[in-house]
Amino acid sequence: MSSKREHEDNEGEGYLLNSKRQKVSEEVSPASSPPVVSRREIQVRRDCPYLDAVNRQVLDFDFEKYCSVSLSNLNVYACLVCGKYYQGRGRKSHAYTHSLEAGHHVFINLGTERVYCLPDGYEISDPSLDDIRHVLNPKFTEEQVEKIDGNKQWSRALDGSDYLAGMVGLNNIKQSDFVNVTVQSLMRVSPLRNFFLIPKNYEHCKSPLVHRFGELTRKIWHARNFKGQVSPHEFLQAVMKASKNRFRIGAPSDPAEFMLWLLNTLHSDLKTEKNTSIIHDYIDADGGVLVTESCRKTFLMLGLDMPPAPLFKDVMERNMIPQVPLFNIMKKFDGETVTEEQRYRVTRLPRYLILHMKRFTKNNSFVEKNPTLVNFPVKNLELRDYIPLPTPKENDRLHTKYDLIGNIVHDGEPHKNKPGEGSYRVFVQRKSEEVWYKMQDLHVSEALPQMVALSEAYMQIYEQRQSDRKDRRL
């Protein structure tokens, strides 16, 4: 058996790896340094008699890693028998005390992923625990990421339910549906998803929001989860802190506003010295360029104005639900239509196009919702038929066709009028099978393409068609 030496106290531990068995002492200066701190040898064993007590049914690593007693996030362990979090593993630590009082002996360090037996104190090295490590911190190789869209294999949770990686539900944590639909939509933007599946792509970044978004992305696309849903709790905590409580748990908000804030914040946190990032490489920057009479700027989202809602009822005393072609409301960007004393024209197309149907109108004391249905194509949106586009340069090809990959829908009344009644859901496409799914928090079900087009679309993400597409974005 091999051994590893570690210094440990009541709340933390330091690591000193060595291949030989020996007692090691820290070298200290006799003049100003503290007394010598002894390091004791940590035995590594494979034959732990308590592994049968590990209960995977109670393990949930989606929540913040805080000790359930001290509320500290330093050196936290999870009890693999009851699932609770405790700090440290020294003789006066909360984890050590729990092992004695409850008779629970197997703990995993949530930072190092090492497993220990308490109160004995030895490290457990057993391959049977690898599945727990994969759930705690899902990992993907570049080869796995490249093939992820072609995966058609279903996974099975511990409760026997089946789920598809990437098509798992998200917990609604006190009216957080606006976050859930935004995240589920962005999971269909392949370059963005692939970037966040590999942590080394952003290991230099110090932003907690970036790392929490990356963790959430890996959990959503992980095929070896213990359950068929994920809680975005840690991500929401990072959002609250980064947005200074502009978006917070328990307060409903607009997914369009949240989408813009999230993409801009991720770009700001990830941008290089050249002011580029994965966000602007595919959704902004070299992508979409919008020109007005007074300026030229890049855009993340195009806001589309809805026609006025009908004021009269039909002969059956019901409000008529009008319909409008997407072509009509896209005229705002034809370079000729005047909107708010401005003319708008798109002069460069992004790889991913986000459209926002402005359904809500704020009045003095309430918010009015426009129920108009927008008729839009699910596949082959030809922008050339909607708005004038620039002439491509010599030897370049202008790619103007888009396919819908995400469609966020609002149901019911606006939250500000009748709190709790309005809600958001999203239709997303699974590329491997070209099948549509309806996702509303924890509920995920297959949907017919016709139902996608018959919904009250609020925000959409279109992907530029890849056939015969060159690397240069036009």
Image (spheres, grey):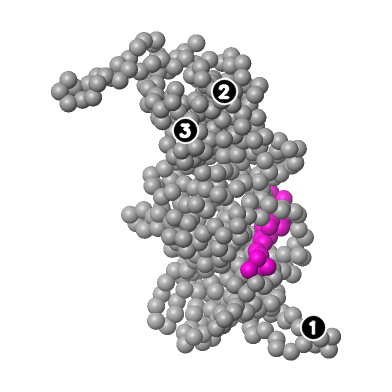
Instruction: Please determine whether, in this image, residue 65 is positioned above or below residue 359.
Output: above
Name which residue lies at 77% across and 87% down.
Answer: 313
Contact between marks 1 and 3 (CB within 8 A): the answer is no
Name which residue lies at 75% across and 62% down.
Answer: 449
**Mark 1 or mark 3: which comes first in sequence?**
3
**Mark 3 or mark 2: which comes first in sequence?**
3
For mark 2, what is the residue? Answer: 105
For mark 1, what is the residue? Answer: 318
**Residues at marks 2 and 1, CA–CA distance in whole angstroms:** 66 Å
Q: Position of residue 153 (x, y in %)?
A: 71, 40
Magenta part of the protein: which range? 419-440
Residue 470 appears left or right of 456 = left
Q: Is residue 431 magenta?
A: yes
For the question of whether residue 468 can be seen, the reply is: no
Front in this rendered view, residue 171 or 37: 37
- Residue farthest to the front? 101
